Amino acid sequence: MSPKKITLSLLVIVMLMLSAVGVTAQDQTQVRISWWGSQTRHDLTIAAIELYESQNPGIDIVYEFQGWNDHWTKLSTQAAGGELPDIMQHDYARIEEWVNNSLLLPLDEYVASGVIDTTNISESSLAGGFVNEQLYGINLGNNSENFTLDADAFEAAGIEIPPDDWTWADFEEIAMKLHESSGKYAIDSNITTEQLWKSLYMSCCDQWSYNADGTALGYEDDQPLVDYYKMLLRLQEAGALRPYEEMIAMGDQGVEANPIVTGEAAMAYFWSNQIVATWTAAGEDRNFIMHTVPRFEGGQPANYIKPSMFFSLTSQAKQPEEGAKFINWFVNSVEANEILKAERGVPVSSVVREAMAPTLGAAQAEMFRYLEVIESNNSPIRPADPAKHADVINNIFIPEFVEPVMYGLITPEEGAALLREEANAILGS
C-alpha cells in the first residue's frame, strides 16, 4: 500500500484542526480506497480526498494507487488475504468476474435509502454497473474509445482531418503519409489492445469478441482480425508504427510516455477520459483533436459509450456505509468534480455537467464535444465481459496471439486460429 507521506509540521496542523472540532485521531473512521490511473489522476483524486476530509473531520481516507496492471495484481492478492479496501475502482470488463466471485457488495440498498443519490444520473449512465439485475458499480464518467490526433502534425504533413466514418484503409494511408512526411511514428503499438479486437467485430459484422453467454468467441470468421494484424505488420515494417518490442520494453508508464505526448507520433489510441492526462503531460500549447475509431468499409460505427470505470464497495469492506457516502459525494458534488476536472470521463450527474460547462479547460471541452459526437454516432454497448475474460486475455490473447504475431514468429492466420482454439477451450470449460 502507498502510505500518505505527511511531514511532521503538516501532521501537527492536521491534529490541531481535528482538535479544534473536537475530533482526535483515535475518533476518526478509516476508509480505504484504491484506484488505477495516470499521475494526473492520482494528483486530482488526492486533492478531492483532502477536500472530503476537511468537510468530514471524522473520516480518514487512506488511499492506494497504481497503474492498470498493478492494480489488478495487487487487489487480487488482497482479495485472497481478505484485505481488500472498502472502495475499489472497477472496470466494465471485469466487474462480472468479481461479482461472481462474491468480492463486491450490491449498492441497491444505499440507493434506496438515499445514501447514494442517483436522482440526476440517467438510466443509461447507470446501466453498465448492473450485474444479475443488481447495481455493483457507480459509473464515474461516460467514455468512449478515440484516436487522438495531433492537429498541428496533420497540418504540417498537409493531411486533412478525416471524416467521422473513416475506414481502416483510410487510417493506413494516413499513417504512411504521416511517417513519410516527418520520419516519426504515426501511432503507438498499443493499438494491439483487446479493446480494438472487440471493436473490429462490432464494426464489420455487428458481433463481439464473446457470445452472449460467454461460453465461446462471438464470431465465426477470423478474416477481419487477420486483415487488421496484417495492416499492423505493414505499418510496423514501414516504421509508421512504434515497434511492439519497444512498447513492451518501456513497460506501463501511463499516457505520459505515449509517443504523441513526447512529440514522436501524430496519433494515439486512448479512451476519451485519458485526454486530460494526455494534454496535461504534453503541454497546453499542443493542439489535439479526439476522433472516432476507424471502421471497416461499409461497416457500422466502431464506437460505443462505455462507463469509464466504477467505484464499487468490496465484500471485505469494514466501513461500507462510509464508503457509500464517499462514492455519493464523488459523483454528485460540484466542488469535488471541479477538482477532478472530468479526468475519469464526462460526469454522469446532469447537475455537475451543467455547473462545470462554463469552466471547462481545453482538454475537458474537447472531451465533452467528442462524447456529444459519439452520442449520435455509436453502436449499442455489448454485455460485460464474461468471468473468464481476464484468463483469455492474460493467458491466450496477449502471449499466444498478439506477441508472437507482432514479433513475426507466427502469421496472423496461425495466430487467429490458435486464439480461437484456446480461447474457446477456456470459455467452454
Image (cartoon, grey):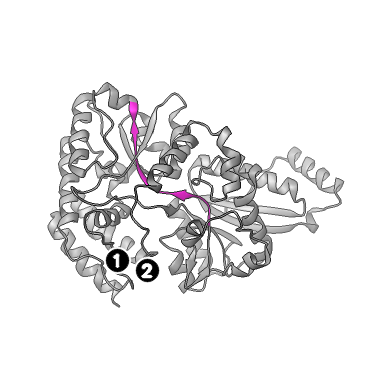
Choose between 407 and 285: the one closer to the eye: 285
Mark found first going from the N terminus, 2 or 1: 1
Residues at discs 2 and 1 in contact (Cβ within 8 Å): yes
* Horizontal arrangement in the rendering, residue 80 relative to residue 217 (left or right): right
Write the residue at 19% across / 49% down.
298
Write the residue at 36% across / 69% down.
388
* Viewport quadrant of the C terminus: bottom left
Count of numbered marks: 2
Write the residue at 27% across / 60% down.
397
The disc at residue 168 is none
Label 2, secondary structure: give it: loop
* Horizontal arrangement in the rendering, residue 19 relative to residue 239 (left or right): right
Choose between 173 and 381: the one closer to the eye: 381
Q: Is residue 201 above or below residue 377?
A: below
Q: Is residue 333 magenta?
A: no
Amino acid carrying label 1: it is: Tyr
Q: Which residue is mark 2?
A: 386
Choose between 251 and 206: the one closer to the eye: 206
Amino acid carrying label 2: it is: Pro
Residue 137 percent location from the top left of the image: 53, 62
Q: Is residue 145 magenta?
A: yes
Q: Is residue 1 above or below residue 320?
A: above
Residue 234 percent location from the top left of the image: 15, 42
Residue 187 percent location from the top left of the image: 28, 37
User: Dot 2: within a 10 Å radius of its alpha carbon, few (fewer than 14), some, or many (20 or more) residues?
Assistant: many
Q: Which residue is mark 1?
A: 210
Range of magenta residues? 139-151
- Decide if residue 307 is in sight here: yes
Write the residue at 47% across / 58% down.
124
Residue 398, quarter of the rendered image: bottom left
